Amino acid sequence: MEIMTRKISFAPDEYYHIYNRGTDKRKTFLDRRDHIRFLVSLYLGNNKHLIHPSDWSGKSFENIFHLVQINFPDRLVDIGAYCLMPNHFHLLVREKEDGGIPKLMQKLQTGYSMYFNKKYQRTGSLFESKFKAQHVDDDHYLHYLLAYIHLNPVKTISHDDWQNKKIKNKDKAKEFLDHYDFSSYHHYIGQPKPHNNLLSVADFPDYFKTTKDFDDFISEWIKFDN
C-alpha cells in the first residue's frame, strides 16, 4: 500500500481547496440519490456534534436541508463552493476551528462510503486513501477557484476541450452549467436549491456584488481560449 504524506497543515481562518476521487478512478456517484446523499453527509457532518442521516429516516434527503438547521458556531468549516463529478468532488472551504477539515472529511468519506458499499453490495475503499488539499493563500487563486470548481461539469460533455483549455461550443457549455444540479453554481446565479443551504459564504471575499457579476465572470472564463 502506498503511504501518502500530506504536505500542508490546516489552520483556522485559512482557505483550502479540498478534493478526492474514486479509487482506481471509479465512479462514486451513479444516480441522483447518490449525489444528494453525499451532500446530506456534507451538511450534517459539518458540525462539532454527531448527527447522522438515519436520525431523519422517513424524510427525503432534499427535505433534510430544510428541516435541519446547522448552527454557525458549531460548523467545522465554512463552505464557499462545491461540485460533484461522476468520479470525484471539489470543495472550497475555510477552516473554522483547529482540526475542522480532517474531522469533516473523515465523517464525510466514511459515511458516504458505507452508504455506497451497502447500496451497491461492494466492499473496500471507495475513495483514494487521503483526500487532497491545497492551501489557498492568494486572493487571485481563490478567485480563480470559483471559476475552476464551477466549470468542472463541462468535462462531462467536452473532455477534450477542457483538457485543451479551449471550449468550442460555448453556448452549449453555458446551458449545461445552468442545468447541472450538483454544484453551488445555482447559488451564485440566484437560483436557490435546497442543498445550497450547506453553504456559508459570509467569510469569503465578496467578489460578486450581483448574480449578474458571477454570470458574467463564468461567461468570460468559458469564452477564454489559450
Image: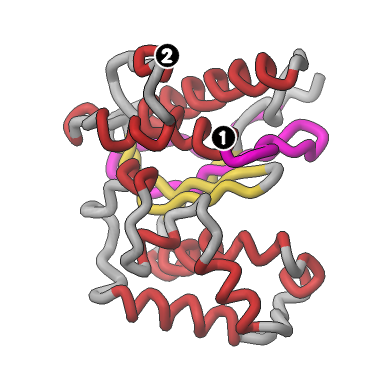
Q: Is residue 226 above or below residue 165?
A: below
Compared to residue 177, the image places residue 112 above or below, namely above
Would you say residue 14 sits in the magenta stretch? Answer: yes
Instruction: Report, in whole angstroms, how far the alpha carbon at label 2 lies from the one at label 1.
Output: 15 Å
Q: Which image quadrant is residue 69 in?
A: top left
Q: Pick whichever, 107 or 172, lies toward us.
A: 172
Q: Is residue 215 left or right of residue 181?
A: left
Reading the chain from its start, which is encountered first: label 2 or label 1?
Answer: 1
Q: Does the segment drawn in magenta span residue 175?
A: no
Residue 111 is situated, as x and y percent measured from the top left of the image, at 53, 19
CB within 8 Å, label 2 to label 1: no
**10 Å crowding of disc 2: few (<14), some (14-19), many (20+):** few
Relative to 154, is 58 on the left or the right? left
Which of these two is toward me, 61 or 19?
A: 61
> For mark 2, what is the residue?
54
Q: Residues within 10 Å of mark 1 (few under 14, many from 20)?
A: few
For residue 33, which numbered disc appears in the image? 1
Residue at the location (34% across, 41% down)?
198
Residue range corresponding to the magenta coloring: 4-33
Q: Amino acid at mark 1?
A: Arg
